[in-house]
């Protein structure tokens, strides 16, 4: 309902704000009684979107109508996400009105029906994303359209450019700013902290902004969060980089590509990571972070994200093409993605692998160390810290003589202090049902197991592998250990394991 202002124009109805403690995984929600004057006068319904304003700030939220009892007639309940974005105090009075219609949905429909989109079209869509005018269902439609009707090179370039334009863009004042990325799909492939430490120890500038998990049990930011704070603001990031040459932080905290943060949340829900969107997501964040050179790891394997060498070569070519068009030097490395890297899968288990490699522990996973050295070598040569062909030797020496470990610890201290990864409250060992040879390890199923155990939401959760493909085992020998907060999550994981074993043993 609206009232008339001094000029005779309607003004939004006032409502008292109530914090209801509802966690909605990133989507702002607003609760109002079905019989309140706003819902009745405006004809609002479930999934309608409302604009709430208080104290000079506003947020667009999805409406959840509720029956009498939870709220009074003149109260509006806000989810934790809506409350944080509005930044209002309990009991504050807010105005509520129906949210404007998202005009860009006509562009989303154009893509759904096979049309092409321009940079101006993508800018309009991203503008509505920024304003919160597109619901999760509408965001899912946009992302699904780009998967079913793949973005071509021009569209991918246009989307990347538009994503950079709507966020912050950093400038480090140096001619070369390095970065490293993995396209994902390979559990345990946590090379970034090792690579950053080596590169920074060699004098390169490498302000690494990382993502949280999309479809995996851990993203780099999730793993790094078990070792040091990652939610740094821009001034803190600059302080760390000026002091140590590098950082490893969560990019979402500085809104370098805020529209992509909304996409990532939906991609996680629908388990979708289309190629055009992947390219735009990766490169927009690198460009926004001020990077000039990036090395991209593309694992290839039958159960990795990229299944074949041909698909990997095509993706590498597109990444390089779009990067070049937007002034970014991209070098792609096609790597072995047939089985997980290291032993840990999940934030804390992967962090323990990283520390073991950096500290040169005798039992450190050598496959993780070797992979990190290959990527670091490429980065050192691209950044001019080593001559062509000399990156591998330099990277190895920096890791072996302790410079990488010292630099990593210094970066962690600068970010707020190095800490030990948490231990899970519950563990459970899964053993070989029979003797024989480990024939295959399914990356996707292992990742699913770790997620059912609670990763990445519970930073201590996941699993630790005890075998690799090609190993010989006897009946009852450990295959892996699950880490979880409760027996309930372990039961979920074991039930899935019974239906879809991720490790096969052949006689």
Image (tube, helix red, strand yellow):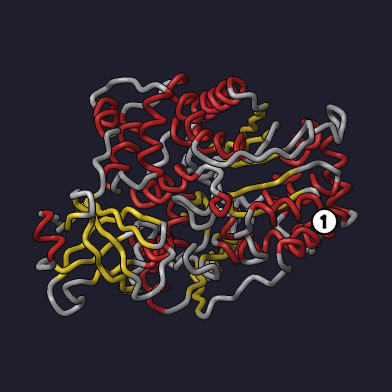
Residue 335 visible in the picture: no
The N terminus: image quadrant: bottom left
> Is 330 on the left or on the right of 443, as rendered?
right
Q: Which residue is drawn at 70% across and 46% down?
A: 207
Residue 116 visible in the picture: yes
Q: Is residue 289 above or below residue 459?
A: above
Q: Is residue 364 above or below residue 440?
A: below
Residue that label 1 marks: 407
**Residue 126: quarter of image:** top left
What is the x, y in percent for residue 202?
A: 86, 44
Q: Is residue 126 above or below residue 230?
A: above
Q: Which residue is drawn at 24% across and 30% down?
A: 106
Q: Residue at x 81, y 41 (%)?
A: 204
What is the x, y in percent for residue 373?
A: 76, 44
Determine crowd level at label 1: few under 14, some 14-19, many 20+ residues with C-alpha closer than 10 A.
many
What is the x, y in percent for residue 317?
A: 56, 22
Say which element carries label 1. Answer: helix
Q: Which residue is drawn at 31% across and 45% down?
A: 133
């Amino acid at each position: 309902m609206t009232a008339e202002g001094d000029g005779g124009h309607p003004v939004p109805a006032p409502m008292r704000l109530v914090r209801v403690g509802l966690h909605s995984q990133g989507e702002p929600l607003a609760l109002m009684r079905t019989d309140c004057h706003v819902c009745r006068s405006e004809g609002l319904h479930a999934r309608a979107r409302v604009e709430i304003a208080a104290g000079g700030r506003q947020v667009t939220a999805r409406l959840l109508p509720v029956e009498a009892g939870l709220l009074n007639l003149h109260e509006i309940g806000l989810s934790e996400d809506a409350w944080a974005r509005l930044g209002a105090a309990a009991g504050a009075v807010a105005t509520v009105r129906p949210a404007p219609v998202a005009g860009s949905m006509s562009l989303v429909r154009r893509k759904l029906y096979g049309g092409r989109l321009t940079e101006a079209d993508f800018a309009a869509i991203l503008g509505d994303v920024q304003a919160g005018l597109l619901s999760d269902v509408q965001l899912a439609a946009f992302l699904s359209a780009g998967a079913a009707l793949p973005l071509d090179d021009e569209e991918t370039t246009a989307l990347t450019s538009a994503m950079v334009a709507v966020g912050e863009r950093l400038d480090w004042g140096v001619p070369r700013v390095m970065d490293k990325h993995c396209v994902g799909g390979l559990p345990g492939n946590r090379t970034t902290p090792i690579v950053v430490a080596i590169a920074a120890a060699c004098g390169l500038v490498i302000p690494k902004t990382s993502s949280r998990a999309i479809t995996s049990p851990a993203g780099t930011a999730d793993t790094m969060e078990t070792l040091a704070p990652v939610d740094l603001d821009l001034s803190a990031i600059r302080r760390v980089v000026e002091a140590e040459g590098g950082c490893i932080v969560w990019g979402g905290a500085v809104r370098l590509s805020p529209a992509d943060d909304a996409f990532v949340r939906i991609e996680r829900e629908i388990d979708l990571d289309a190629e055009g969107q992947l390219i735009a997501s990766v490169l927009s964040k690198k460009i926004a972070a001020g990077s000039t050179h990036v090395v991209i790891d593309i694992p290839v394997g039958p159960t990795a994200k990229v299944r074949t060498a041909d698909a990997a070569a095509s993706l590498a070519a597109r990444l390089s093409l779009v990067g070049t068009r937007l002034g970014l030097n991209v070098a792609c490395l096609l790597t072995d993605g047939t089985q997980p890297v290291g032993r840990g899968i999940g934030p804390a288990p992967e962090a323990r692998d990283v520390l073991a490699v950096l500290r040169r522990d005798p039992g450190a996973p050598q496959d993780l160390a070797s992979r990190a050295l290959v990527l670091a070598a490429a980065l050192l040569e691209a950044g001019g810290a080593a001559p062509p062909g000399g990156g591998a030797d330099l990277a190895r020496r920096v890791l072996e003589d302790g410079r990488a470990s010292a630099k990593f610890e210094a970066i962690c201290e600068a970010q707020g202090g190095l800490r030990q990864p948490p231990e899970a409250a519950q563990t459970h060992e899964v053993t070989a049902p029979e003797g024989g040879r480990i024939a295959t390890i399914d990356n996707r199923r292992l990742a699913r197991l770790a997620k059912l155990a609670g990763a990445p939401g519970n930073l201590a959760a996941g699993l630790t592998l005890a075998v690799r493909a090609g190993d010989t085992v006897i009946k009852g020998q450990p295959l892996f250990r699950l880490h979880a907060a409760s027996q309930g999550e372990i039961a979920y994981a074991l039930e899935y394991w019974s239906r879809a074993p991720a490790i096969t043993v052949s006689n």
